[in-house]
């Protein structure tokens, strides 16, 4: 082998090693951040329990939180996060997630392994039963002694011992249960938003899992709560024929991912926007659009041209969903639903299914978005059509923040799925 070839091979090996080290470093940094977040949340949880204990001893009218905040900030002026307001949140955090609640969360979380509306409703109903006040569960223990006569800072060192006595278990077991729960997978800012929301435990837990799955920032989480995503995705009476046109579990997943209504962020919107205007806005703000569509959606085309016979046709929007392994055709109507919309839409789904779907893709799904309409009429109109179709309302708003982040599919994930299509030139 020539020296040039050896040198080239060495450079390639070096490049591979550098890339491997970089990838491992990135993964290590993520694990370090995740671990640090779990440690911080566990500390806040312990402090919250400590406050509950002191309040029970001194009465709810005491100024335990104010005194504790002043003492910590006085002795540790460089430590942030111990304001009276944040200590109150720590107290609420501990009350909201007792050991009993954390244990139950671990039991029901497996229901989300196969996401469906029925599974989520079962999960939320089971968790909503935990309405008892955690403070009442804290029994008098042999810690009582002279704990109140000590300075609050000195008492902080005894939080672990106190928790062990309260839950009749060693602190390492308590920590394991806490850090294996879903609540450590999101940050403190998101927990504060959830505590302020006053949502029941089951819905709060669902929002936590969604924030983790979709990579929501705290701003996006706030927006999803304000637009009542749980009601729009889980409890809404959806109109579709998925259950009869798609096999399980794809039908369950399609129904789970569907929302009603969809809420799209529009810049410079007017009361009467034509379909093309709405499309143009959605495509120009595609990240926000995909965020509202939900997990696993990727943009494929707008006004996709298809030549059928001697005629030209244009599909409004085409997406691809990695979880469903299927193309999704979106048709937008700026008017309320009309039964006559179904024939044309079914035709477009047939064309896209025939032109784009490869052997590794599931049946193409249609989603007709209308600006209002009668749900009963829409459900009747679906009968007789072979393609899987859902019909939803959509609303236009400016609710979505500019600085959002979401776990949209990566370019590599999209390319991997699309590479399986038989005819890439269509």
Image (cartoon, rainbow, N blue to C red):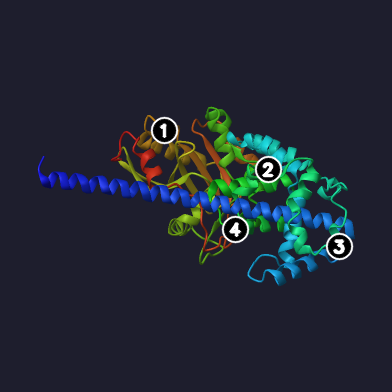
Badge 3 is on which residue?
149
Q: Position of residue 143 (x, y in %)?
A: 84, 50
Find the distance from the CA under tag 1 to the CA under tag 3. Answer: 69 Å
Badge 4 is on which residue?
218
Q: Residue at x 73, y 50 (%)?
A: 160
Find the distance from the CA under tag 3 to the CA under tag 4. Answer: 40 Å
Q: Is residue 254 left or right of residue 363?
A: right
Find the distance from the CA under tag 4 to the CA under tag 1. Answer: 34 Å
Sequence-earlier tag: 1 or 3: 3
Which residue is nearer to you in this view: 2 or 116?
Answer: 2
The C terminus - image quarter: top left
Of tags 2 and 4, the one toward the viewer is: 2
Q: Position of residue 254 (x, y in %)?
A: 54, 37
Which residue is nearer to you in this view: 87 or 306?
Answer: 87
Find the distance from the CA under tag 2 to the CA under tag 4. Answer: 30 Å
Find the distance from the CA under tag 2 to the CA under tag 3. Answer: 28 Å
Residue 164 image-quadrant placement: top right
Q: Residue at x 81, y 55 (%)?
A: 52
Q: Residues within 10 Å of mark 2 (few under 14, many from 20)?
A: few
Q: Position of residue 339 (x, y in %)?
A: 56, 41
Of tags 4 and 1, the one toward the viewer is: 4
CB-based contact (under 8 Å), mark 1 and mark 3: no
Residue 263 image-quadrant placement: bottom right
Element type at mark 3: helix
Sequence-earlier tag: 2 or 1: 2
Number of numbered discs on residues: 4
Badge 2 is on which residue?
172
Badge 1 is on which residue?
361
Sequence-earlier tag: 2 or 3: 3
Query: In the image, is residue 361 above or below residue 227?
Result: above
Find the distance from the CA under tag 2 to the CA under tag 1. Answer: 47 Å
Q: Is residue 256 left or right of residue 280?
A: right
């Amino acid at each position: 082998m020539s020296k040039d070839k050896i040198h080239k091979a060495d450079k390639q090996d070096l490049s591979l090693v550098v890339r491997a080290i970089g990838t491992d470093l990135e993964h290590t940094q993520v694990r370090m951040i995740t671990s640090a977040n779990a440690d911080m949340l566990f500390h806040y949880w312990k402090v919250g329990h400590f406050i509950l204990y002191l309040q029970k001893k001194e009465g709810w009218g005491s100024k335990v939180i104010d005194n504790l905040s002043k003492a910590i900030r006085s002795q540790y002026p460089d430590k942030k996060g111990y304001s009276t307001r944040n200590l109150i949140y720590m107290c609420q955090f501990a009350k909201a997630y007792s050991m009993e609640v954390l244990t139950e969360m671990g039991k029901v979380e497996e229901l989300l392994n196969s996401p469906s509306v029925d599974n989520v409703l079962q999960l939320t109903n089971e968790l909503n039963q935990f309405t008892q006040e955690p403070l009442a569960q804290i029994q008098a223990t042999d810690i009582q002694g002279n704990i109140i006569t000590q300075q609050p800072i000195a008492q902080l060192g005894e939080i672990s011992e106190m928790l062990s006595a309260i839950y009749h278990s060693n602190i390492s077991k308590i920590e394991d249960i806490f850090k294996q729960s879903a609540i450590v997978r999101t940050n403190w800012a998101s927990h504060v938003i959830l505590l302020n929301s006053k949502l029941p435990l089951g819905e709060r837990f669902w929002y936590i899992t969604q924030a983790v799955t979709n990579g929501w920032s705290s701003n996006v989480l706030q927006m999803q709560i304000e637009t009542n995503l749980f009601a729009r995705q889980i409890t809404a009476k959806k109109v579709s024929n998925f259950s009869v046109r798609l096999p399980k579990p794809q039908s369950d997943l399609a129904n789970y991912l569907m929302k009603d209504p969809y809420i799209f962020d529009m810049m410079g919107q007017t009361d009467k926007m034509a379909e093309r205007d709405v499309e143009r806005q959605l495509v120009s703000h595609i990240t926000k659009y995909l965020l509202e569509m939900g997990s696993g959606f990727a943009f494929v085309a707008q006004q996709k041209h298809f030549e059928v016979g001697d005629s030209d046709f244009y599909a409004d929007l085409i997406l691809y969903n990695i979880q469903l392994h299927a193309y999704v055709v979106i048709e937008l109507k700026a008017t309320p639903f009309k039964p006559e919309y179904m024939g044309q839409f079914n035709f477009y789904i047939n064309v896209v299914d025939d032109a784009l779907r490869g052997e590794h893709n599931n049946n193409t799904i249609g989603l007709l978005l209308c600006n209002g309409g009668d749900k009963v009429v829409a459900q009747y109109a679906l009968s007789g059509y072979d393609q899987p179709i859902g019909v939803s309302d959509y609303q236009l708003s400016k609710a979505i923040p500019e600085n959002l982040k979401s776990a949209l599919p990566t370019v590599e994930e999209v390319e991997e799925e699309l590479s399986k299509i038989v005819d890439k030139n269509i």
